[in-house]
Image: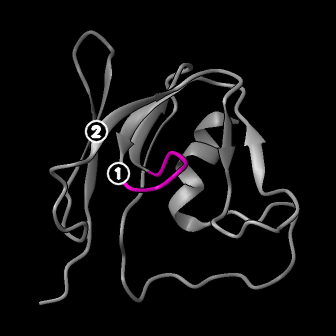
Amino acid sequence: MKASCSSFTCRSSDGKHFLGRTYDEYGDISTNKVVVIPHNYEIKLSFTKNKENNRQTVDYATVGMNISGFNTPFLTEGMNQEGLMGALLFFPYFSQFDTRESLYDVNVGLLLPFVLGK
């Protein structure tokens, strides 16, 4: 069986928002930890060391679940200080990568710290 991730959001009766998700493709998550990325922290945007625009200083503090073993935050989900939430979900066969040149070269696994930080 091929698996993919799923997520949901809901709002409580007092107006608070919640984000939930499944971990269908991440294997052993026992070493993953909650991480706080502080305001003005410099994150990497790709794992390629010699690319231009390889780093970004975040404008917003972010908290999220970090996949251990990388030398930069690699979030599976998170929320920034303004309340913007996101999740890294796996949908096989439903996406493709744009190969055109762009201002930023962001590894898909590093997209959440990038988006939530800006």
Label 2: few (<14), some (14–19) or many (≥20) C-alpha neighbours in 10 Å? few
Query: Where 38 falls versus 89 (above or below)?
Result: above
Give residue 2's quadrant in the image: bottom left
Picture quarter with the N terminus? bottom left
- Which residue is denoted by mark 2 in the rendering? 33
What quarter of the picture does the C terminus occupy?
top right
Q: Can you tell which quarter of the image residue 59 is in? A: top right
* Cβ atoms at labels 2 and 1 below 8 Å apart: yes
Kind of residue indicated by mark 2: Lys
Residue drawn where x is 26% and y is 66% of the image: 5
**Residue 77, located in which quarter of the rendered image?**
top left
Along the viewing direction, whichever of 27 and 82 lies nearer the viewer: 27
| 73 relative position to 101: left or right | left
Residue drawn at x 22%, y 15% as measured from the top left? 13
Q: Residue furthest left?
A: 1
- The residue lying at 71 percent from left, 24 percent from top is 40
How many numbered marks appear? 2
Q: Tell which of 107 and 92 is nearer to you.
A: 107
Return the residue at label 1.
68
Element assignment for label 1: loop
For the stretch drawn in magenta, what is the main secondary structure? loop
Residue at x-position 27% and y-position 53%: 7
Q: Which of the two labelled residues, at mark 2 and mark 1, occupies the earlier sequence position?
A: 2
On the image, the x and y values in percent for residue 98 come to 71, 81
Q: Amino acid at mark 1?
A: Ser
Q: Which residues are magenta?
A: 68-74
Label 2 to label 1: alpha-carbon separation: 7 Å
Q: Is residue 47 magenta?
A: no
Q: Which mark is residue 40?
A: none
